[in-house]
Amino acid sequence: MSERIGLEASHAAAEAARMADVDVIAAYPITPQTHIPERLAEMVANGELDAAYIPVESEHSAMSTCVGAAAVGARTFTATAGPGLEYMHNVLYVASAMRLPVVMTVANRALSAPLSIWGDHSDAMSVRDTGWIQVFCQNSQEAFDMTLWAFRVGEDAGVLLPVMVHLDGFHLTHVTEPVILPEQEEVDKFLPKFHYPFALDPDKPMTLGAFAPPDVYSEAKVAQEVALRKSKAVVIKGFEELGDIFGRYYHPVEPYKTEGAKTLLLTMGSFSETAKTVIDAKKDRGESVGLINLRLWRPFPFKELRQAVKSAEILIVFDRCISFGGPGGPVSSEIRSTLYDEKQRPKVVSFIGGLGGRDMSAKDFEYVIDRGREIAENGSEELYETVGIRGKVTDIRG
Amino acid sequence: MEGQSIKFGKNFVTTEEFLAQGHTFCTGCGEALALRLACKALGRHVIIANATGCTEVCTSPLPVTSWRVPWIHTLFENTAATASGIEAGLKILMKKGKTPEKNIKCVAVAGDGGTTDIGIQALSGAFERNHDFLYLCFDNEAYMNTGIQRSSATPYGASTTTAPAGKLSIGQTTWKKNLPEIAVAHNIPYVATASPGYPFDLMNKVKKGGDIKGPAYVHIFSPCPTGWRHATDLAIEIGRLAVETGIFPLYEVENGRYKLNIDRPKLKPVEEYLKTQGRFRHLLDEEIEKIQEHVNEEYAKLKAKVACFST
Ligand SMILES: Cc1ncc(C[n+]2csc(CCOP(=O)(O)OP(=O)(O)O)c2C)c(N)n1
Ligand code: SF4
Ligand SMILES: [Mg+2]
């Protein structure tokens, strides 16, 4: 029988790695990720998990060590946040291009300067194009489920790609919530043993990571791009299998009360749960609103997103990251581009907030929806507007 | 199929090549020779993690490879960390019965730039964590692959493209970073210096480093005709001169105990070494004298360490 217990989201992620029987964990501590490696180190020290816990000297080495371990066929896990993710940036591309299914939790954190240990999505957005499969989580249960799912999908023989599971720093990582933990047998049913077909082995010498002259490089990159796009089928299959075994069904794009709604709000990660309460309240007042929780970030779920928003008139996109000098928040600009060629599409309004741990209350989301509708009707002086931030960003339409 | 062994004096060397011909190292490259010898010493039961640099670029242009042993290149700066993962991964997979028990040595290969500069943090970490791996640094005293830029292993007075000799400069104005000593400071079980000028000594050390449990470090002097501007038939001779002048002494440090492998009662003047290479051509007598004094001093320090342990 599975059990329902109170678990911090960080510990839920660690628990999933334990139940996946990971072989190698290489991690470097950084707030707000610390509870994950600490818990795993404890499990290894207590014999709850038979794994090599490698206390590397940096995040750059954490990912490099994961790459080395995955290349010999080990199931490999790490976790980091903000500046740590930036510090391993170079290696992220290597992991995906070499088709090594490392799983990593990112406790989303703002980037310096000024230093902030608190959450936003600047780190996630900066690694958007690294070739990893990426999902966002709303709560502790999802932190557990998505971590397990990440191994299932990344290690699939038809995928072989690394997977990043995003948990909002503090707002999610440090929150204790009820989590249903499955039985080990259920986990084993969901997650087959890892068999890496290209493991380095003296009995079968192979050259991994050779350098590519211009007549080879482009083909290698296109092959990688095809692999990531094709992985979507397994991403969805993984969600379905997870649902069939554990009873919780996930989707790349998750509409919440969007039936017939004229105005939709789109959020990612844990803030979606706050936004849902606002949708409930507004619906009770007879407003025609709904929410889209964007779970799958890479490969981007074009079809699902278009389908989910096609009947709406207004789509308000909430970003937790500034794309400096760019066309609004990174998520909103991707969504604009996704919808650009559609004959029937909602007007997209872009908001940015929740930076560096700034809370977004229900009232703030109410403001976003109300103001978003006004902007859709009357336009705005600005390319995007901010919420809950002192001082006005003027003249940014340029 | 294992190759045959050929006897050279009291040394046996396999005819088998693990680094195949067809690579693109320059003619007369001392690094290529040293790498080939090291591979012979290691045999086939290895996994090599290679840093970016000549050893990587000259051996792995897709779609071909010179490597007959499993080999991985990831980046320039992280080879010791990649090796850490390979070593730890293999160990735990064997412990958990997920991979058959085999004797496989993880060997990291990097240049002086990848070791003494950009890779030193990863290397220090891997030493400190006590991974069972062998790290081979092929020291050609500059970033050769990118066009002879200075590194912290470039010797005083050498002219490179980023520390060129000119009206106001002698080229490199700092003394070579002593990485073997930094390795020793990590209290690892085995540190050695080697040179393709002494091929059997080199192979013995690489083999020993590979056999030892725990981290081992072999720093290999690698004459580079292209970067040092020396004749292409001189790599071995220059390798020997570096030892005979005391510029690059051959020694081992086993569990902290120093041993000088080649000890000449009288060192040759450094000038004999310097004059073989275009990178030192601009040096005036006073600079050569300064180098001589420095070499004398360093050599004396090394001998003192050796003396501590001689019984
Ligand atoms: C992060 C990063 N910085 C710089 C480079 C460029 N780079 C590649 S190889 C190299 C120099 C290699 O020098 P060394 O390690 O001494 O090896 P050698 O080529 O001399 O054998 C440099 C600077 C790189 N590939 N990656
Ligand atoms: S540049 Fe020097 S080290 Fe590199 S291949 Fe040529 S000779 Fe060898
Ligand atoms: Mg070099």
Image: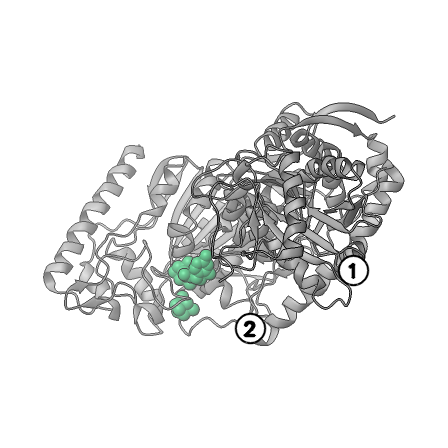
Residue A131 visible in rendering: no
Given the current orientation, which residue lies at the most extreme front position? A378
Callout 1: SS: helix
Q: Quadrant of residue A184?
A: top right
Location of residue B54 in the rendering, given as x and y in whole percent from the top left corner? 45, 65
Q: Is mark 1 within 8 Å of ligand 1?
A: no
Q: Quadrant of residue A108?
A: top right
Image quadrant containing the N terminus of chain A: top right
**In the depicted view, which residue is nearer to us: A315 or B277?**
A315
Q: Chain of mark 2?
A: A
Q: Are marks 1 and 2 on the same chain?
A: yes
How did the renderer colour the structure? one colour
Callout 2: SS: loop
Discs 1/2, front: 1
Location of residue A162 in the rendering, given as x and y in whole percent from the top left corner? 67, 51
**In the depicted view, which residue is nearer to us: B165 or A129?**
A129
Q: Is residue A383 left or right of residue B263?
A: right
Judging by the rendered image, the residue that carries numbered circle 1 is A303
Residue A59 visible in rendering: yes
Q: Quadrant of residue B64?
A: bottom right
**In the depicted view, which residue is nearer to us: A10 or B69?**
A10
Q: Is residue A230 left or right of residue B298?
A: right
Which image quarter has ligand 1?
A: bottom left
Residue type at the position of mark 1: Lys
Q: Chain of mark 1?
A: A
Judging by the rendered image, the residue that carries numbered circle 2 is A213
Location of residue A350 in the rendering, given as x and y in whole percent from the top left corner? 62, 53
